[in-house]
Amino acid sequence: MTILSGWSLTCPTCGFTTSPGLYPRGCPACLERCEVSALVVEYDEPGTLLPAERTGAGIWKAANLLPAVSPELRLTLGEGDTPLLQVPILSEISGCERLYLKMESQNPTAAHKDRLHAVASAVGKALGYEGIVSSSTGNHGFSMASYAAAHKMRAVVVANQRMPLLLQRAIRFAGGLPLLAPPELGGAISTALVEDDGWYPASTSWPMPMANPYGVEGYKTIGYEIYHGLGGRMPDLAFFPAAGGDGLVAMWRAVADFRRIGLPNLDVRICPAQPAGAAPMVAALEQGLDHVPFFPDAYSRALSIGDPTGGWLALRAVRETNGFGVAVTDDDILATGRVLARNGLLVEPSSAASVAGALQALRERPELREQTIACVITSSGLKWLDDYETDPVDLPGGVAVQTVDDARAAVDRHIATL
């Protein structure tokens, strides 16, 4: 079980190139100059377009466009091949007839994180690691624990204290250990496990925010599938819920892959949607900054995208595609999630942010209504239902009934609330 040839890591800032390995603090050449830069994967050959058909290989059907590891490590839990949907109510609300949702909630752990961990865990195993660690608000950790189990690796999740109990239990059930740590301690725990105890980091490296470079490659396949789903073209606009911005970088890299292959119709504007209370990337774009500022008081009910800062590579991805950012209020995010739920789609608040951002952009810029728009839905709302209410008791469970009359009365009360 090994790393195969044909690819390497490179620094987009200084050009440093090295063989695949563990670089938790990013580019070592930049670090020597007291600078910080992420590393990205570079391929020797341009590769070929993955098939549109479901093959049973998960995202590894695009193996020639992903980090090369020995075939026995290309494990899949069935990730990828998620639907690209049109929802009539959204076209009715927005006036845009070509508004699509990329439903990443259809992945094995109901989140787009499965694409990241399909690749990140495979590379970690190929590098010889037996333990894998991540920092997570929920989706990331559960997905990592699941892929770690498939690879027979130990898993520790340094969890946000607001992580839903359901996800804590799911991580345990998959064999992982969730550690509920205060924010000021989480980084120290991850650093100690990686640098002192020899664990492999599947999520952000230090200093924040730099993603695992191998895992980001898995996210690229979202862009590949959108291209197929739209009949061989990228959308005019792609909206992503954004914190660190790994999804933005991945879409940008998908376009770069297709350019190397020589495919047409690749112009897409990559657009981050962030909560108004935690929108550092939007601020950087609007203020023309060359870095993403740190927001010490960042907060959002959409926990997964409530980060205080973001990645500079994501900022570059947005700028190079002439994209723009949208800051949406928590109220709008939650209201959009409720609209989707009442039309059959249960998405987490962070996912609803991409749709809320697109709807806000369409209200403010009516000329966009003639364009093709894709919003990435990153995860199911089933794991995050409490975030739609100010208090979990506001969202009741079942109604106990003892007679048919009790049932009819409950039905009548329910209908009256609709």
Image (cartoon, rainbow, N blue to C red):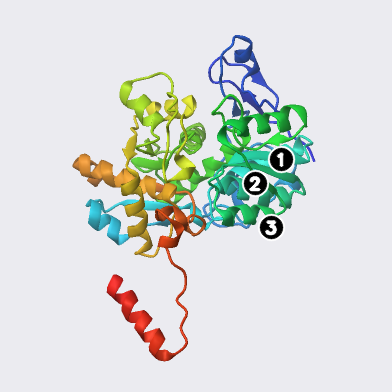
- 168 relative position to 193: left or right: left
Between marks 3 and 1 in the image, the one whose residue lies nearer the viewer? 3
Q: Under tag 2, what secondary structure?
A: helix
State whether residue 69 appears in this view.
no
Can you say whether 334 is above or below 311 in the image? Answer: below
Between marks 2 and 3 in the image, the one whose residue lies nearer the viewer? 3
Q: Residues within 10 Å of mark 3 (few under 14, many from 20)?
A: few
Answer yes or no: do the residues labelled 2 and 1 have beta carbons within 8 Å? yes
- What residue is shown with label 2? 144
- What residue is shown with label 1? 132
Residue type highlighted by circle 2: Met
Q: Under tag 3, what secondary structure?
A: helix
Write down the quadrant of residue 215 in the picture.
top right
Q: CA distance from mark 3 to mark 1?
A: 16 Å
State whether residue 386 appears in this view.
yes
Q: Residues within 10 Å of mark 2 (few under 14, many from 20)?
A: many
Q: Under tag 1, what secondary structure?
A: strand
Q: CA distance from mark 2 to mark 3?
A: 13 Å
Q: Position of residue 52 (x, y in %)?
A: 51, 53
Residue type highlighted by circle 1: Ile
Locate the C terminus and report the quarter of the image it occupies: bottom left
Can you say whether 253 is above or below 414 in the image? Answer: above
| Mark 3 vs 1, N-terminal side | 1
Between 264 and 300, the one nearer to me in the picture: 300
Task: Determine which of the numbered discs, if any, sits on residue 173 in the image.
Answer: 3
Q: Position of residue 228 (x, y in %)?
A: 45, 49
- 104 relative position to 358: left or right: right
Can you say whether 411 is above or below 21 in the image? Answer: below
Q: CA distance from mark 2 to mark 1?
A: 8 Å
Q: Identify the residue at the far bottom of this view.
A: 404
